[in-house]
Image (cartoon, rainbow, N blue to C red):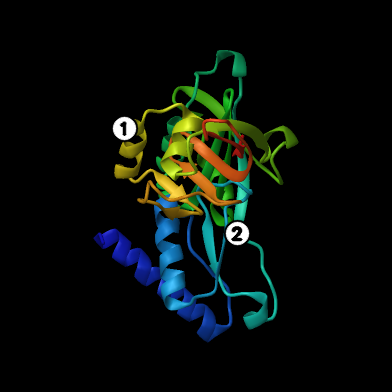
């Protein structure tokens, strides 16, 4: 375990203990997929009370909330706000990437854990941030690359950008996790194995290094850099024993 992982594990335990002792909710900042995997292991090992949320169903980066209604007596929302960053003159704007928006925000002196998912749509971005940082970003972020921009807070994503699932049907040789990933993303066996070696495959929000795992109904499979899907069912088989499966991909 790295020093960063040891620190995070101690922080998770500390927040859970403070929540229990003070009967208050405590939150982490936004956690990466790798951080979330470690959190699940820590929660299981120490029997902690924790809930995750990133502002939308298929969020990659999420906050952890320690405490629950049963132990505290009330419930509070996650302190997450959504801001929209868009060019003042879209016609003359640069083209932007996820990295451009993230870099511009972090150049304000903001830590990475205060920023959640960034959804880039054409030349604008919807960004999930810690609520306490939203006004600071609105007041101080003036440019992304060379383009002057405006920042506003919104209550929810426009409906066309909200979480959706698209059904896909695949023909695979088995229900092994590496086979399903290869079938979905049209990869060779070696390409898929490299994803596992690079620690880019997550199963039900936990880092997965077992490429031969046999997927089960409602397993959530996330491959960093490619996407996320839910395995739903087998719905047929060929004479040669290949399997037709249904998955739902987050889009």
Q: Crowdedness of circle 2 by 10 Å Cα count: few (<14), some, many (20+)?
A: some
Task: Say whether disc 1 or disc 2 marks the residue closer to the N-terminus.
Answer: 2
Depth check: 171 or 101 in front?
A: 171
Image coordinates of residue 91 in percent, x first then y, are 60, 13
Asked if residue 88 lies left or right of residue 186, the reply is: right
Mark carried by residue 108:
none
Q: Residue furthest top?
A: 91
Query: Label 1: which residue?
Result: 190
Image coordinates of residue 139 in percent, x first then y, are 56, 42
Marks 1 and 2 in Cβ contact (< 8 Å): no
**Up/down of 46 relative to 223, above or below:** below
Depth check: 87 or 196 in front?
A: 196
**Does the rendering let one see residue 139?**
no
Identify the image quadrant of the C terminus: top right
Q: Nearer the viewer, mark 1 or mark 2?
A: 1
Image coordinates of residue 86 in percent, x first then y, are 60, 29
Report the residue at 51% width, 41% height from top: 140
Depth check: 17 or 206 in front?
A: 206
Depth check: 144 or 165 in front?
A: 165
Q: Secondary structure at mark 1?
A: helix
Q: Crowdedness of circle 1 by 10 Å Cα count: few (<14), some, many (20+)?
A: few
Q: Residue furthest front?
A: 239
Report the residue at 35% width, 50% height from top: 209
**Alpha carbons under labels 1 and 2: distance apart:** 42 Å
**Up/down of 13 relative to 205, above or below:** below
Mark carried by residue 79:
2
**Does the rendering let one see residue 243?**
yes
Report the residue at 48% width, 76% height from top: 16
Q: Secondary structure at mark 2?
A: loop
């Amino acid at each position: 375990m790295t020093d960063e992982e040891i620190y995070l594990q101690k922080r998770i335990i500390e927040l859970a203990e403070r929540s229990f002792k003070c009967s208050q909710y405590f939150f982490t900042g936004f956690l990466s997929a790798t951080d979330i995997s470690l959190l699940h292991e820590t929660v299981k090992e120490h029997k902690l009370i924790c809930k995750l949320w990133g502002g939308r169903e298929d969020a990659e980066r999420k906050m952890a909330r320690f405490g629950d209604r049963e132990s505290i007596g009330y419930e509070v929302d996650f302190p997450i706000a959504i801001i929209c960053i868009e060019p003042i003159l879209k016609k003359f704007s640069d083209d932007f990437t996820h990295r451009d928006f993230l870099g511009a925000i972090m150049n304000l002196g903001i830590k990475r854990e205060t920023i959640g998912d960034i959804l880039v749509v054409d030349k604008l971005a919807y960004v999930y941030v810690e609520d306490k940082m939203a006004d600071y970003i609105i007041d101080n972020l003036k440019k992304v690359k060379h383009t002057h921009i405006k920042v506003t807070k919104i209550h929810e994503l426009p409906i066309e950008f909200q979480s959706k699932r698209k059904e896909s049907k695949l023909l695979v040789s088995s229900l092994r996790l590496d086979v399903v990933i290869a079938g979905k993303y049209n990869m060779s066996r070696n390409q898929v194995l490299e994803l596992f070696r690079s620690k880019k495959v997550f199963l039900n929000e936990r880092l997965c290094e077992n490429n031969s795992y046999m997927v089960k109904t409602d397993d959530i499979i996330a491959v960093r850099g490619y996407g996320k899907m839910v395995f739903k069912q087998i719905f047929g088989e060929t004479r040669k024993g290949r399997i037709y499966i249904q998955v739902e991909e987050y889009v």
